[in-house]
Image (tube, rainbow, N blue to C red):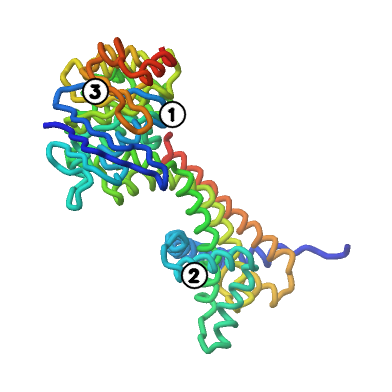
Amino acid sequence: MSIEIQDVHKAFGSLEVVKGVTMTVEKGEVVSIIGGSGSGKSTLLMCINGLEPINEGRILVDGTDVHGRGTDLNKLRRKIGIVFQQWNAFPHLTVLENVMLAPRKVLGRSKAEAEAIAVDKLARVGLSEKLKVFPSKLSGGQQQRMAIARALAMSPDYMLFDEVTSALDPQLVGEVLDTMRSLSAEGMTMIVVTHEIAFAREVSNRVAFFHKGRIHEIGPPAQVIGAPREPETIDFLKSVL
Amino acid sequence: MNYTFHWLPAFRALPDMLWGALVTLEIAVLSMVLGVLFATLLAVGASSKYRVFRAAAVSWVELARNTPALFQIYMAYFGLGSLGIHLDSFVALLAGITFNNAGYLAETFRGGLRAVPQTQLRAARSLGMGQIQAFRLVMMPQMFRIVFYPMTNQMVWAILMTSLGVIVGLNNDLTGVTQEYNVRSFRTFEYFALAAVIYYLLAKLVTGSARLLAWRLFRY
């Protein structure tokens, strides 16, 4: 049970943004990816659940080749939850309906089952009071927590977080990080692309520093953040801390 | 001004005119239903990878939006007639208005589709929904809200356009019935004023029901 990324290259037109990344994330692990913008870290996440095709290499999720010819991506995505920087709430559905939608329509759960799942997940992220509310009435932090609940409702084995606090007002960052912290405490396997260095240091088993489409340095947070060896890592950390 | 108004004959004609209004509404509704179907095809066709479809869709939209509706109806009746294709008045009018509706609605739909962010599709797909499922459950409902009011406008426009049926000999819609009475009595002002009131009420009925429907449908 793991996500294996093997020498992945990804280009948009002639611009190569991921230039040969190899890493394995074991079940139960939390790996944070840090690095400057344009370093390819978000793109890599999109490749992991097949939202973006890749040009070279391969990505195996529990042994299934994500970009393989016969792979049923819809089925594979059920076990890989993703939360985006722009939370992407479905505006025409209430908070409860947002979270119920995929369990009902993708997993084929009954309305009652889906509702029970949704109520449970929304309680987890602290939104029990907001079930009947439309997303437009929520703060950014609440919408982002709803997005996390929506992904969790599919009972994924892996969760991908793509700079989920970057678009939030500073005072709302904490509530989202708290939710993620509790997830990691429960043993959820997570890949977290983030600019929150302190958070990455606290929750991660390993931290990967991306630079110009490559993993420049990877290891335990105490090493990569605490005692970085590469000059680029040192420069980057200096600029964000 | 030495004209004496005689409203009584006009009011006597009211029941017939109301039956005419029903035909008017029938044509408008049919032209909208067909218009929406064709507009959907046009909107899809306009972004097709085949040039033939693209060209056909673009020409339709361009012609429908940039030539008078009167000409479009005239062509359906007399134009096709001179080519040996004889449509009756009702069908010709319906075809003309449908052509016009489809052209305008195609642009409305295209705009509506663009107005829903692609990130919504991405979020839906990331939850394991297939392309069609994501489109139906996430994109369509949002798009529908965006195109709802422009569609209402088009419906009103379709009702008013049906009055052009008189030039292709339609005599049982509201304008047709009114004109029949008019030529018999020449109480032009009274008959057409009454007809105008009925058109006005029909249009208000449409916008009013649309507002009510929107209030029920779009809760967010």
Residue B189 locus on image (x, y percent): 74, 65
Amino acid at dot 1: Ser
> Is there a contact, CB below 8 Å, between mark 1 and mark 2?
no
Q: Mark 1 or 3, which is nearer the eye?
A: 3
Q: Which residue is mark 1?
A: A136
On what subunit does the disc labeled 2 rest? Answer: B
Where's residue A177, x and y in %? 32, 16
Q: Does residue A112 appear in the picture of this structure?
A: no
Nearer-the-camera pick, A21 or B113: A21
Q: Is residue B1 above or below residue B90?
A: above
Contact, CB < 8 Å: mark 3 with mark 2?
no
The Cα atoms of the two marked residues, 3 and 2, are separated by: 53 Å
Quarter of the image with the C terminus of chain A in it: top left
The three-letter code of the residue at mark 3 reads Val
* Disc 3: host chain: A
Q: Callout 1: helix, strand or loop? A: helix
